[in-house]
Amino acid sequence: MVRKFKPPLMKLLESSNIDLCFANQDEATELLRDEHNADPVVTVEFLASIAKGLW
C-alpha cells in the first residue's frame, strides 16, 4: 500500500486532515525509505511530528 500510493499518502499525512493513522513496522519504514534511508528513529520522529498536529 505505501509503495504504491506513497506520494498521495505523504501529502495526506502532512496535511493533518486525518483522524487516525496506524501502520506496521514495514509500512512505517517504507514511508521514508528513499528520503532518510529508512532509519527507524527518523521514521518514528516523523510520525510523531504528524501526531502532534492532530492533538
Image (cartoon, helix red, strand yellow):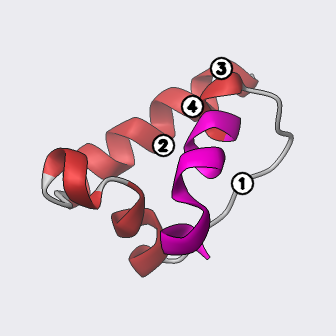
Q: Which residue is mark 2?
A: 47
Q: Which quadrant of the figure contains the C terminus? A: top right
User: Does the residue at mark 1 contact the one at mark 2 (Cβ under 8 Å)?
Assistant: yes
* Amino acid, disc 2: Leu
Judge left or right: residue 14 versus residue 17. Answer: left
Judge left or right: residue 21 versus residue 27. Answer: right
Q: Which quadrant of the figure contains the N terminus? A: bottom right
Judge left or right: residue 43 versus residue 3. Answer: left
* Amino acid, disc 1: Cys
Q: Which residue is mark 1?
A: 21
Q: Which residue is mark 3?
A: 53
Q: Which residue is mark 4?
A: 50
Residue in view at x 53 percent, y 57 percent? 6
* Amino acid, disc 3: Gly
User: Does the residue at mark 2 contact the one at mark 4 (Cβ under 8 Å)?
Assistant: yes
Give the magenta part as a residue range.
Answer: 1-12
Is residue 2 covered in magenta? yes
Residue 48, percent from left and from top: 48, 37
Q: How far is mark 1 from mark 2, CA to CA?
A: 9 Å
Q: How far is mark 4 from mark 1, CA to CA?
A: 10 Å
Residue in view at x 37 percent, y 67 percent? 30
Q: How far is mark 3 from mark 1, CA to CA?
A: 12 Å
User: Does the residue at mark 2 contact the one at mark 3 (Cβ under 8 Å)?
Assistant: no
Taken as a whole, is the magenta stretch helix, strand or loop? helix
Q: Residues within 10 Å of mark 4 (few under 14, many from 20)?
A: some
